[in-house]
Image (tube, coloured by chain):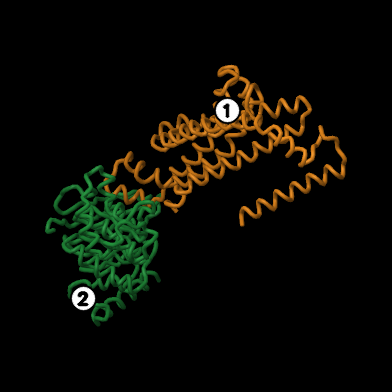
Chain colours: A orange, B green
């Protein structure tokens, strides 16, 4: 049912798109038709695949590092009051900074290659993962904590055996959010300076008025993000199921 | 299990300066079931939490001590209205929770013997969600027994169960907790009349020791003396609330 409605929505969007092209008669370098975009996509499939792979690699490495850092930070924050006092305001402040504005400096520091894009993806997902998991860790049902305390459990063991498992559904929703954000981070990194990746391809195609190729790359990025989201949702399904 | 001590609670409690309960003295007989009966908000759960060493949100002025003079908090096992089973852990893991939380070696044989006593052996590897409310509360009882503590604090442990399951759980708990010092906090006069070696009604005015049948517990639900006791407890709660 969910997939049917997604297919129906896609068909509707394509129709609307085609209608706009037909009715307005816009030139194809302004708005190419869906059929032209599809044709361009097929003709350039090898090129698009190569750049998709570059972006996918940045996103996956970024996701793993960002999620890992987020998990470690959240546990550290939950375990130590001192850390909370020192680090929490700092974390909130960094969220007031536009992460996008950091992209040029990251490129300066880490170069035009893979790592400046990975860093961008990490930066963009670190906070949602940390914040979601930390919230979960701080919302352990009081009854569990009472029970554990009467069992003479140490705070570290309560954290490991009760608070962390109880917070896994919150972590799962943080990770699903991260799967959507990470590609945005990588693409912004590519816009600032890159020689590979879908973001680079979009920028290059746009610069040469190859709007059809731009659209093809953009739609590929969209499909990739949705697939990534589905994969992460699938991988984290057990975190939800066991802790309801 | 004759090493179960009595407990003496003496003092008063207040929340943000407003008195929760006036100075009171509560004595729990060694190896006996004491029922603390009262309506909502009179502070009976606070008394229980004070004994167990848990945070109460109230300020307590007084002393809580075991009659043998030894430390209290480490000799207490606690069971609440909510079964507090960890949903992600199997039944056997839930029963072993205390040992795991203390980093002790897990005694699986003992755990299986206890599961057998509460009649849940074949459910050992299931998750709590697969069990009924009564079965879950039996797991909670098994977890409490696994702790093997001389003092048992029960905070309305059976109040979420249907009448039939509740009666069965009361029988099972009395059988399995024999010889332990038990404090059961309840708002159910029938439960108090069935289970109390001592029955104490808690109202805003303080504690009242109530007469109870001299028959052994758990008293039969259709026993006339028990029913009379239940009725008089209910009357007392009504006058206390009025």
x%, y% of residue B10? 25, 55
Spatial distance from mark 1 to mark 2, Cα to Cα? Answer: 75 Å
Left or right of residue A116: residue A23: right
SS category of the residue bearing label 2: loop
Depth order, front residue of B12/B128: B128
Extreme bottom residue here?
B224
Depth order, front residue of A168/B207: A168
x%, y% of residue B232? 30, 77
Q: Nearer the viewer, mark 1 or mark 2?
A: 1
SS category of the residue bearing label 1: helix
Depth order, front residue of B88/A102: B88
Are labels 1 and 2 assigned to the same chain?
no
Residue at (74% x, 47% y) in the render: A13
Marking on residue B213: 2
Output the chain of dot 2. Answer: B
Question: Image quadrant for the C terminus of chain A?
Answer: bottom left
x%, y% of residue A58? 56, 29
Q: Residues within 10 Å of mark 1 (few under 14, many from 20)?
A: many
Marking on residue B141: none
- Determine the image quadrant of residue A219: top right
Q: How crowded is mark 2: few (under 14 residues within 10 Å), some or many (20 or more)?
A: some
Depth order, front residue of A143/A223: A223
Instruction: Kindly indicate whether the residue at mark 2 contacts the one at mark 1 (C-beta within 8 angstroms).
Output: no
- Determine the image quadrant of residue B229: bottom left
Left or right of residue B150: residue A198: right
x%, y% of residue A234? 51, 46
Residue under numbered circle 1: A120
**Above/below status of A144 relative to B141:** above
Let me know if residue B156 appears in the view: no
Residue at (16% x, 60% y) in the render: B30
Output the chain of dot 1. Answer: A
């Amino acid at each position: 049912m969910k997939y049917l409605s997604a297919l129906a929505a896609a068909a509707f969007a394509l129709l609307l798109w085609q209608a706009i092209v037909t009715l307005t008669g816009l030139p194809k370098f302004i708005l190419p038709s869906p059929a032209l975009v599809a044709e361009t996509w097929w003709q350039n499939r090898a090129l698009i695949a190569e750049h998709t792979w570059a972006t996918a690699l940045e996103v996956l490495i970024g996701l793993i590092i960002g999620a890992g850092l987020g998990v470690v930070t959240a546990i550290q924050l939950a375990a130590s009051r001192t850390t909370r006092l020192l680090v929490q305001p700092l974390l909130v402040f960094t969220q007031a900074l536009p992460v996008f504005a950091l992209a040029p400096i990251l490129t300066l520091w880490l170069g035009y290659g893979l790592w400046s894009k990975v860093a961008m993806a990490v930066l963009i997902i670190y906070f949602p993962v940390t914040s979601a998991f930390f919230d979960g860790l701080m919302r352990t049902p009081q009854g569990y904590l009472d029970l554990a305390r009467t069992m003479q459990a140490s705070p570290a063991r309560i954290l490991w055996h009760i608070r962390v498992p109880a917070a896994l559904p919150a972590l799962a929703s943080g990770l699903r959010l991260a799967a959507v954000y990470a590609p945005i981070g990588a693409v912004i990194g590519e816009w600032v300076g890159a020689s590979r990746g879908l973001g680079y391809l979009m920028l290059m195609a746009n610069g040469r008025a190859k709007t059809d190729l731009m659209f093809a790359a953009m739609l590929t990025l969209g499909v990739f993000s949705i697939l990534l989201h589905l994969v992460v949702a699938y991988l984290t399904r057990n975190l939800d199921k066991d802790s309801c | 299990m004759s090493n179960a001590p009595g407990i003496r609670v003496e003092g008063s409690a207040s929340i943000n300066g407003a008195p929760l309960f006036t100075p009171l003295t509560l004595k729990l007989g060694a190896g006996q079931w004491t029922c603390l009966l009262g309506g909502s908000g009179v502070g009976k759960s606070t008394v229980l939490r004070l004994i167990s060493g848990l945070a109460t949100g109230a300020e307590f002025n007084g002393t809580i001590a075991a009659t043998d003079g030894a430390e209290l908090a480490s000799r207490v096992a606690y069971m609440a209205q909510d079964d507090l089973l960890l949903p992600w852990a199997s039944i056997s893991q839930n029963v072993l929770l205390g040992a795991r939380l203390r980093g002790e070696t897990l005694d699986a044989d003992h755990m299986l013997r206890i599961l057998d006593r509460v009649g849940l052996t074949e459910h050992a590897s299931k998750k709590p969600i697969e069990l009924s409310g009564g079965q879950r509360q039996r797991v909670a009882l098994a977890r409490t027994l696994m702790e093997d503590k001389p003092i048992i604090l029960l905070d309305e442990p059976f109040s979420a169960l249907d009448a039939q399951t509740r009666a069965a759980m009361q029988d099972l708990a009395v059988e399995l907790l024999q010889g332990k010092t038990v404090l059961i906090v309840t708002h159910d006069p029938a439960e108090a009349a069935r289970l109390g070696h001592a029955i104490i009604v808690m109202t805003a005015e303080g504690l009242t020791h109530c007469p109870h049948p001299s028959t052994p517990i758990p008293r039969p639900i259709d026993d006339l003396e028990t029913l009379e006791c239940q009725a008089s407890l209910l009357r007392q709660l009504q006058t206390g609330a009025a």
